[in-house]
Image: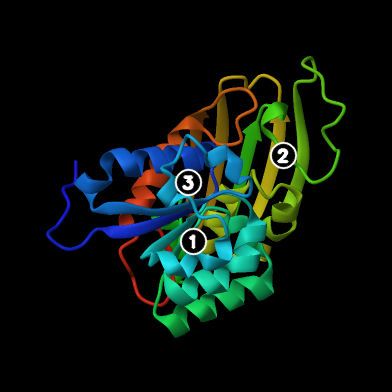
């Protein structure tokens, strides 16, 4: 385990207290001193959910007053709407780890946050989540050699949170159904809570962007124990890579179990990488 340095610990603000937020808060409180992290605040849309779970002095009632807590890093783990409403303000005061990178599929917001990071000299961190090989995709893109990127995410229908009723009629005997195939830019608004891995891939594939990366989401009633993430990378002269990741997950779980640990490792990276977007 990494030990804390002699410098002051990084003060972390956690925005959102769902399953992932709870995991992060518990781990910062229990292991923070050992890894150089200190919890500055926790905010949740329903503050009553925090009572008895989070020390009272760490509960932030009004998110607009986040700057008073003097955070080094603010972590969003709730909803893209928070990224839209507070992203620029967070970056004006702190580094920002965006747990809902699907929000970045909106071109205007994407540019606003990139500009805010550059102007303030702070880092907009994008966690890899369930994406395997993100750094390799990024290097291929930066070198100009990335030609195409396709991602398929397959889950049990109970694990999807969609903005329309396309899955309202599913049954356990249904089997496999392709729900959508197209650009990640089109897919993110349809399933903002399910495709953050695809959004991270679109950030890594900077040369292609959200409009150039292709994605597919699949409902499969056979997947009762795990999610499946398939990534197909195409480079020059016949170069291809195809990875398949099976991420253990309970029925109804939006996020697979292994992604929690991945997110924690991403947080440990957030120590400042200049005014830019950084995949971690």
Name the residue rendered at 85%, 31% in the picture. Answer: 168
Q: For the residue labelled by badge 2, is the local secondary structure a helix, a strand or a loop?
A: loop
Residue under label 3, please give it: 129
Look at the numbered discs 2 and 3 and tell me whether their residues touch, using CB distance below 8 Å. no
Image coordinates of residue 94 in percent, x first then y, are 42, 70
Dot 2 alpha-carbon crowd within 10 angstroms: few under 14, some 14 to 19, many 20 or more: some
* Viewer-side label of 3, 1: 3
Name the residue rendered at 53%, 81% in the picture. Answer: 115
- Where the N terminus falls, by quadrant? top left
Residue under label 1, please give it: 204
**Residue 143 visible within the image:** no
Left or right, 235 with reference to 176: left
Task: Specify the color scheme.
Answer: rainbow
Q: For the residue labelled by badge 1, is the local secondary structure a helix, a strand or a loop?
A: helix
Q: Which corner quadrant of the image does residue 218 belong to?
A: top right
Q: Which mark is residue 36?
A: none
Q: For the residue labelled by badge 3, is the local secondary structure a helix, a strand or a loop?
A: loop
Q: Tell me which numbered mark, 3 or 1, is placed earlier along the sequence.
A: 3
User: Who is closer to the viewer here, 176 or 237?
Assistant: 176
Dot 1 alpha-carbon crowd within 10 angstroms: few under 14, some 14 to 19, many 20 or more: many
* Viewer-side label of 1, 2: 2
The Cα atoms of the two marked residues, 2 and 3, are separated by 17 Å
**Does 134 sit above or below residue 115?**
above
Residue under label 2, please give it: 161
Q: Tell me which numbered mark, 2 or 3, is placed earlier along the sequence.
A: 3
The Cα atoms of the two marked residues, 3 and 1, are separated by 12 Å
Dot 3 alpha-carbon crowd within 10 angstroms: few under 14, some 14 to 19, many 20 or more: many
Image coordinates of residue 266 in percent, x first then y, are 38, 51
Q: Tell me which numbered mark, 1 or 2, is placed earlier along the sequence.
A: 2
């Amino acid at each position: 385990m990494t030990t804390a340095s002699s410098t002051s610990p990084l003060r972390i603000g956690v925005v959102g207290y769902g399953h992932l937020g709870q995991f992060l808060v518990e781990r910062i409180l229990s292991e923070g001193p050992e890894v150089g992290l200190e919890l500055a605040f926790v905010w949740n849309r329903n503050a009553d959910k925090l009572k008895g779970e989070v020390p009272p002095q760490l509960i932030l009632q009004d998110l607009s007053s986040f700057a008073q807590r003097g955070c080094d890093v603010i972590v969003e783990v709730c909803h893209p709407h928070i990224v839209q409403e507070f992203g620029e303000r967070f970056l004006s005061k702190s580094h920002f780890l965006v747990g809902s990178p699907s929000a970045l599929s909106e071109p205007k917001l994407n540019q606003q946050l990139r500009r805010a990071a550059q102007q303030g000299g702070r880092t907009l961190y994008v966690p890899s989540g369930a994406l395997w090989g993100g750094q390799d995709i990024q290097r291929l893109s930066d070198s100009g050699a990335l030609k195409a990127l396709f991602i398929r995410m397959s889950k049990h229908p109970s694990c999807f949170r969609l903005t329309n009723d396309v899955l309202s009629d599913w049954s356990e005997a249904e089997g496999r159904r392709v729900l959508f195939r197209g650009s990640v830019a089109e897919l993110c608004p349809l399933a903002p809570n399910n495709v953050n891995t695809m959004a991270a891939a679109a950030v890594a594939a900077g040369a292609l962007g959200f409009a150039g990366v292709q994605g597919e989401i699949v409902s499969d009633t056979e997947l009762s124990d795990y999610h499946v993430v398939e990534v197909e990378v195409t480079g020059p002269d016949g170069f291809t890579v195809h990875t398949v990741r099976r991420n253990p997950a309970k029925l109804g779980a939006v996020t697979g179990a292994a992604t929690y640990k991945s997110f924690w490792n991403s947080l440990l990276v957030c120590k400042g990488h200049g005014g830019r977007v950084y995949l971690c």
